[in-house]
Image (cartoon, rainbow, N blue to C red):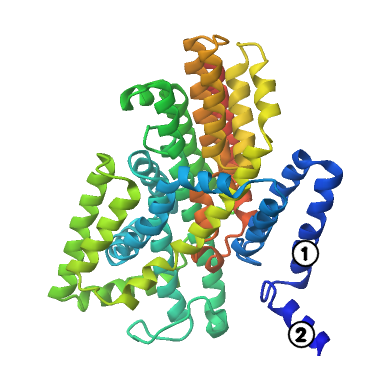
Amino acid sequence: MSESVASALWKNFLGPSPAWYKKTIVAFLLLNPVFLWVLGPFVTGWILIGEFIFTLALALRCYPLQPGGLLALEAVVLGMAAPQTVYEEALANFEVILLLMFMVAGIYFMKELLLWVFTKILLRVKSKIALSLMFCFVSAFLSAFLDALTVTAVLISVGVGFYAVYHKVASGKQIAQEDAHDHADDNTVHENHRTDLEDFRAFLRSLLMHGAIGTALGGVCTLVGEPQNLLIATVAGWSFLKFVTIMAPVTMPVLFCGLTTCVVLEATGKFGYGAKLPDNVRRVLEEFQEREESRRNDRMNARLLVQGLVAVLLVVALAFHWAAVGLIGLMVIVLLTAFNGVVEEHQLGHAFEEALPFTALLVVFFAIVAVIHEQHLFTPVINAVLAMDSEIRPPMFFLANGILSMISDNVFVATVYINEVKDALDAGTITRAEFDQLAVAINTGTNLPSVATPNGQAAFLFLLTSALAPLIRLSYGRMVLMAAPYTLVLGGVGLLCVTLFI
């Protein structure tokens, strides 16, 4: 009886994850107290970061919330981070949590309009290079004035919509069939569609990655583009225009080179890019569009009109910062559901399925950040850079922030660095001109090289852990590979510009 209970417990632990993965997580949990006793909290803290990144890297084997959450719980139990510190980290990022809870759900109720618009773009723009450049540039433009997570939510919604349409047909069903279809199950896909399905996945992967990179290219440019930008500008006392102009010597060359990289990657087909939309898929999407147009009635047109008006209101509200982004998202939910007749509780519930698991994962991530904070894991790096000659401080700050942001949260890294630099300014260690230079290096350093890994940017992590990632086979390793050329260009050009112009 005891053996059967033990066996059942083991099978239930992390569900269908591979046995080797389960054993690895158990090993982490058993070894961490030993590491803490033998090596001390500082080294164990870095080991914990590595273990957490491991859970992110294998997100397709097991959603990171469970194994990462166990590691975070153990860290708190072992005293490496106090529950109050975890709470304070979550409280400091409450706007991001609100955004995920409500804005992503708001975009869900706008998906009919998004699918209609993007289907027209996808079918009319025949050139993959032009289409990729459009995705990258539009994502950059929107992220400069809106929010990278919101833009990513739009891209995910569109990607899932396209994929679901073709997968249904590839499984032998007619577009007109209204019955439910599980687009995550490939067992029903007909053999003659499998090659086209794989090519379509590659096509969507490249578009999504161009779009995700675009959010980083645009997000670094303005005060509202990323959370750390506003934080840095507040400490530095910069206005919106001052922020744009002081960052421009770095951000504008990087934007140009990033867009050029998009064109080169699509033209050469390297690093997983270059896949084109298969003809069979194009025909299915054209048929889908024709059917949607033919069955469009006054109520459907009214829904599209409402979604369009709310989309305009959303852009205006975000651009002029009427309220916290999450509250604007709640406004979108209320307006779209009220005027489009979505008034039953179970209809609302589906909208929150995408965002809430990631919201929980993000709070777990804040627990890891709390460990970094309490154990002062970044302090030696900060002290070493501040001790350097003033001539090389800006590029070294750029590099230090970039490397740390790849493995941690770029908002946290920016917070730590800008506060240390402000303390140095207040103490008279550096001048105001040096402070401005270092602030530019901190902002660009946390925004640009951090595209190297999904955990470097919240938008990338959101994409990796979304429902779309497993559908298009976008794993942690593949994201790192596809981001590598952009990392080199954005990081290299950014470093050069900081060295020459800042």
List x then y, in percent, for residue 39. Answer: 84, 42
Q: Nearer the viewer, residue 223 or 196?
A: 223
Residue at 36% from the left image edge and 60% from the top image edge? 122
List x then y, in percent, for residue 70. Answer: 67, 61
Q: Secondary structure at mark 1?
A: helix
Q: Are the two marked residues, 1 and 2, in contact with CB atoms closer than 8 angstroms?
A: no
478 lies left or right of 242: right
55 lies left or right of 320: right
Residue under label 1: 26
Q: Mark 2 packing: few (<14 Cα in 10 Å), some, or many (20+)?
A: few
Residue at 49% from the left image edge and 29% from the top image edge? 443
Q: Number of labelled discs? A: 2
Vertical placement of residue 4 versus 398, above or below: below
Res. 202 image quadrant: bottom right
Q: Amino acid at mark 2?
A: Val
Q: Secondary structure at mark 2?
A: helix
Res. 473 image quadrant: bottom right
Vertical placement of residue 195 versus 362, above or below: below
Q: Amino acid at mark 1?
A: Val
Point out the frontmost of discs 1 and 2. Answer: 2
Residue at 47% from the left image edge and 42% from the top image edge? 92
Residue at the limit of the structure toward the right, as seen here: 38
Reading the chain from its start, which is encountered first: label 1 or label 2? 2
Please tell me the numbered disc located at residue 319: none
List x then y, in percent, for residue 495. Answer: 57, 25
